[in-house]
Amino acid sequence: MKKNVYDLPCNIAHALNIIGDRWTLLIAKNILVGKTTFNELKEELRGISANILSDRLRTLEEQGLVVSELYSAHPPRYRYQLTESGRELEMVFNSILLWGRRNLEKCFKKIEHNACGHEVEIAYYCPHCEGNVADYTVKAIGE
């Protein structure tokens, strides 16, 4: 298990200790979209070395974001799936994609509403009030 890089009282810092290494989010994103074997991931992520891919998969598994399943004994080969916690990263991927759509000079993807074909936006939702929220405050837990 790697040493925590950020020792700050911040959710973002602690999340980055888990998913902030180079390639980690791209590996998880590719597993989410169906690239579930080592070779599929290696092929999709041009430029990643085999040892880095192995290390990142091991870390994702140690952190409970990925589970592996042996699908060939000789030679041993594994298929990777995201856990529920790993699948929750889809919201992060989509947030980054939408941020890129607005801020990158060259954009490759967009997110559209299936029913009407228009692009979607991120909205905060309050399950208690059952509605979208425009006014919110980020607070330290315990305040």
Image (cartoon, rainbow, N blue to C red):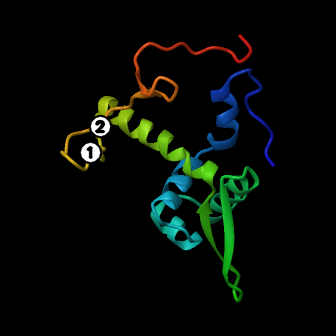
Quarter where residue 95 is shown: top left
Q: Nearer the viewer, residue 66 or 126?
A: 126
Q: Is residue 33 above or below residue 76?
A: above
- Image spot of residue 37 (x, y percent): 57, 71
Inter-mark Cα distance, 2 to 1: 6 Å
Mark drawn on residue 112: 1
Q: How crowded is mark 1: few (under 14 residues within 10 Å), some or many (20 or more)?
A: few
Q: Name the residue carrying label 2.
A: 120
Mark drawn on residue 103: none
Give yes or no for contact between labels 2 and 1 (Cβ–Cβ under 8 Å): yes
* Residue found at x 20% / y 40%: 118
* Residue found at x 36% / y 36%: 98
Residue type (three-letter) at the residue carrying disc 2: Val
Question: SS class of the residue under badge 1?
Answer: loop
- Image spot of residue 50 (x, y percent): 63, 65
Quarter where residue 132 is shown: top left
